Image: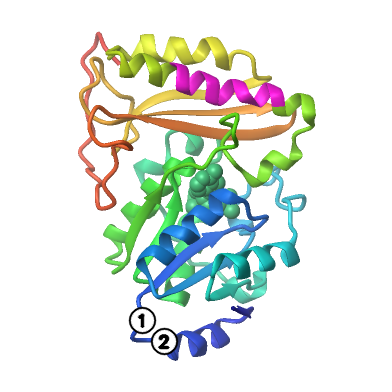
């Protein structure tokens, strides 16, 4: 494995494997098995896997955890080596954002609901850095986790809208044995908060169980989830949205939907989601993004 910190070096290393299929896994580091599932998916389909570690300042709000975001580069490097990553790309902020940087990628409607409603600049920062990293790595396929469901939707839309010749693959969320979604931010949780955080996945899976036995009314499904989610310190949102448009889903559910939650446990903000789909297991096709907004009538969600 090569560890590379500059775009020039990266281009020259990738120049040597130009004929190979390149997979790309963008991360912010402090790696866990969720990240490693993306590496595994990349290795299954590509000859070369590039994993980036970059804690991107433009996707953090002024009061968010940019300076305290967990970091352990040497451990991450060893995990990448063990997982069969070909190139670990770890640029610093100056390498990614040159002086006088002023050009951003501005996502649209998909970035305004769910997390976007509470983190107004977040997806602009995500889209910008992912677009820049795509231009540096020039991958054939890029891998993203379903845990950040809205991020997947925004990135997929961006790839289509900006004619980026990159396949965007969504990999299912990897969970701890007790079903807490793996996240670098879980390390902020103390023992007792960690226990309370389980209410999030408990709520989402309770709703999913109701969906599986035939419940299709959005309000009822959300009420099932809310009963558990009320146990967290502060529920920021719980929303059942159309899986393609991220607009509120309509009852009775007939299209794949995503039940998404963001909640604070102590001062840690956690997100999670489940896909409710009568069809394929995750309700997602890698190439799928319909932009028609589904409309609800006055009576239903
Ligand atoms: P992050 O380092 O948190 O920015 O995440 C980097 C990539 O890993 C993103 O595509 C995330 O969606 C993905 N990811 C994070 N946690 C998980 C998880 N538990 N399961 C699957 N993918 C994940």
Q: Which residues are magenta?
A: 195-206
Residue on which disc 2 sits: 17
| Crowd class of label 2 (few under 14; some 14 to 19; many from 20; radius 10 Å) | few
Residue on which disc 1 sits: 20
Instruction: Name the residue rendered at 43%, 42% in the picture.
Output: 150
Image quadrant assignment for residue 281: top left
Instruction: Give the total number of marks visible in the rendering.
Output: 2
Q: How far apart are the two marked residues, 2 and 1, measured between alpha carbons?
A: 5 Å
Q: Where does the C terminus fall, quadrant-wise?
A: top left
Instruction: Name the residue rendered at 75%, 67% in the picture.
Output: 74
- Say which element carries label 2: loop
User: Vertical placement of 255 versus 162: above or below?
Assistant: above
In the image: residue 4, left or right of residue 154: right
Image quadrant assignment for residue 21: bottom left
Residue 244 on image: x %, y %:
28, 39
Report if residue 115 is visible in the image.
yes
Residue 169 on image: x %, y %:
36, 55
Instruction: Name the residue rendered at 54%, 56% in the picture.
Output: 36
Residue 291 on image: x %, y %:
23, 43
């Amino acid at each position: 494995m090569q560890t590379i910190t500059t775009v020039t070096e990266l281009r020259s290393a990738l120049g040597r494997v130009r004929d190979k299929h390149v997979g790309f896994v963008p991360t912010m580091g402090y790696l866990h098995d969720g990240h490693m599932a993306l590496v595994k998916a990349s290795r299954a389909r590509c000859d070369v896997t590039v994993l980036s570690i970059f804690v991107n300042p433009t996707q953090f709000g002024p009061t968010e955890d940019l300076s305290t975001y967990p970091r352990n580069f040497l451990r991450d490097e060893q995990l990448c080596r063990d997982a069969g990553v070909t190139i670990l790309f770890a640029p610093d902020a100056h390498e990614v954002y040159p002086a006088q940087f002023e050009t951003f990628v501005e996502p649209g409607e998909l970035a305004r609901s769910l997390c976007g409603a509470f983190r107004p600049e977040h997806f602009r920062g995500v889209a910008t850095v992912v677009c820049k990293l795509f231009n540096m790595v020039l991958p054939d396929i890029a891998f993203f986790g379903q845990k950040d469901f809205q991020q997947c939707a925004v990135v997929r839309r961006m790839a289509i809208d900006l004619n980026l010749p990159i396949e965007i693959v969504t990999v299912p969320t990897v969970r701890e044995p007790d079903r807490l979604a793996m996240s670098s931010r879980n390390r902020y949780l103390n023992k007792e908060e960690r226990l309370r955080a389980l209410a999030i996945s408990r709520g989402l899976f309770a709703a999913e169980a109701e969906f599986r036995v035939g419940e299709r009314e959005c309000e009822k499904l959300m009420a099932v989830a809310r009963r558990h989610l009320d146990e967290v310190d502060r529920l920021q949102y719980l929303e059942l949205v159309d899986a393609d448009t991220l607009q509120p889903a309509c009852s009775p559910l007939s299209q794949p939907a995503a039940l998404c939650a963001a909640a604070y446990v102590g001062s840690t903000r956690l997100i999670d989601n489940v896909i409710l789909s009568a069809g394929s297991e995750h309700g997602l096709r890698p190439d799928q993004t319909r932009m028609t907004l589904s409309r609800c009538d006055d009576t239903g969600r």
